[in-house]
Image: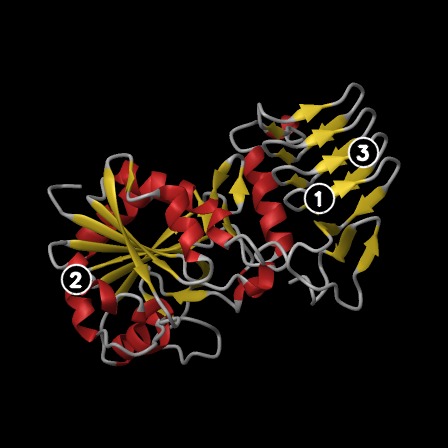
Amino acid sequence: MQGKRLRALVLAAGLGTRLRPLTELTPKPLLPVTGVPILGHTLAQLAAVGCEAVAVNLHHLGDQIRQRFGDVIAGIPITWSHEPELLGTLGALWPLREFFAPADLVLLINGDSLCQWPLRRLVRKHLTSGAPATLLLASRPAPASFGGGVGINHEGEIVSFWPEDPERSEVARRYVFAGAHVFTPELLEKVGPQKSDIVRNLYLPMLDEGATLQSMITHRHWHDLGTPMRYLEAVVDWARAGWPERMWRRTWTSPEAAIGSGAKVRASAVEAGVQVGEGAHVERSVLLPGARVGKGSVVRESILGFGAAVPAGTWVERRIVMPQGAGFAPRLDDSVVGGAVYIPIASPAAE
């Protein structure tokens, strides 16, 4: 990237609490999106943009993540940073000071976001702006759904991070932070060993001191994968990506899945090892590896967990289905039927 040494950190140490029960036994970065783990999509894009090395912080079920990816991806070394206690979005940089020492630019990526990030444009914008940090903002999501959004002025400079944050100048528009930012390594000198948040403990003090933080707006599809419903919407959107709108009932199906005769699968993602029985109907759903849909069943706007089985003739709508005994205890509004737990997908217990 214009002769600059670019290194990145992917934040993947979160507990995935709001995604439970999907994340009880599987860390969020390993949940699949059309056959590739969430983290795999991110690492591939960082390799493509020319990162010379990538770091990933780990905590919840971190050994699974490291085992899945090893120590190299696309010829680029991966540095794994295990956090016995979560350090936060800023504190995660502290153990990686030596890793970032040779870098000219630092990319920080949220591991629970899904996007075809315009990372080259983001870096170019940062280099031309002269700002110490440049944040990627998404125009498609409604800011009200994400805390009100980040406020920028007419020059694209960030002036507030949420509506309650005092505006340092007039806010022209508000957009949603898209989970990617690039900054100069000098900012690492402001990082300490304690748990800290990059907005509250770095960016806000910088704005109060008169520093300029720049933004770049992307109109590409972007998804936060923090809850089961958002994960479902993201995977369905990713499955139809690149297809014209008239074909948005398109489904992504793994070549290692089996679809029975007469079955209809629309606007869904069907992962490896899935079996869909004869005459079954699946719509706007995600079927995770090993899931089974019985003959004549209907599954709509639902997520079938790893190895979950829906018996023949069953109607499932807006539910997460998990095998009973999969490492979590059913809650009061869950149903346990025939060895499977049915969890309302939009309930507070699920999200």
Say what amino acid the circle numbered 1 marks. Answer: Ala
Q: Which mark is residue 248?
A: none
First of labels 2, 1 by sequence position: 2
Specify whether 188 is left or right of 44. left
- Residue displayed at 32% across by 77% down: 201
Q: Nearer the viewer, residue 236 or 152?
A: 236
The answer to which image quadrant residue 73 occupies is top left
The spot of residue 121 in percent (x, y) is 29, 44
Say what amino acid the circle numbered 3 marks. Answer: Gly
- Residue displayed at 83% across by 30% down: 295
The spot of residue 89 in percent (x, y) is 36, 67
Residue bearing the label numbered 2: 185
The spot of residue 209 in percent (x, y) is 23, 80
- Mark 2–mark 1 Cα distance, whole angstroms, equals 46 Å
- Residue displayed at 29% across by 48% down: 122
Mark in front: 3 vs 2: 3
The spot of residue 232 in percent (x, y) is 63, 47
Q: What element carries label 2?
A: helix
Residue bearing the label numbered 3: 294
Most extreme residue toward the top is 261
Specify whether 198 is left or right of 101. right
Say what amino acid the circle numbered 2 marks. Answer: Pro
Q: Can residue 155 be seen in this view?
A: no
First of labels 3, 2 by sequence position: 2
The answer to which image quadrant residue 165 occupies is bottom left
Residue bearing the label numbered 1: 308
The N terminus lies in quadrant = top left
- Mark 3–mark 2 Cα distance, whole angstroms, equals 54 Å
Figure check: 220 above or below 247: below
- Residue displayed at 71% across by 49% down: 323
Q: Nearer the viewer, residue 66 or 342?
A: 66
Q: Is mark 3 on a helix, strand or loop?
A: loop
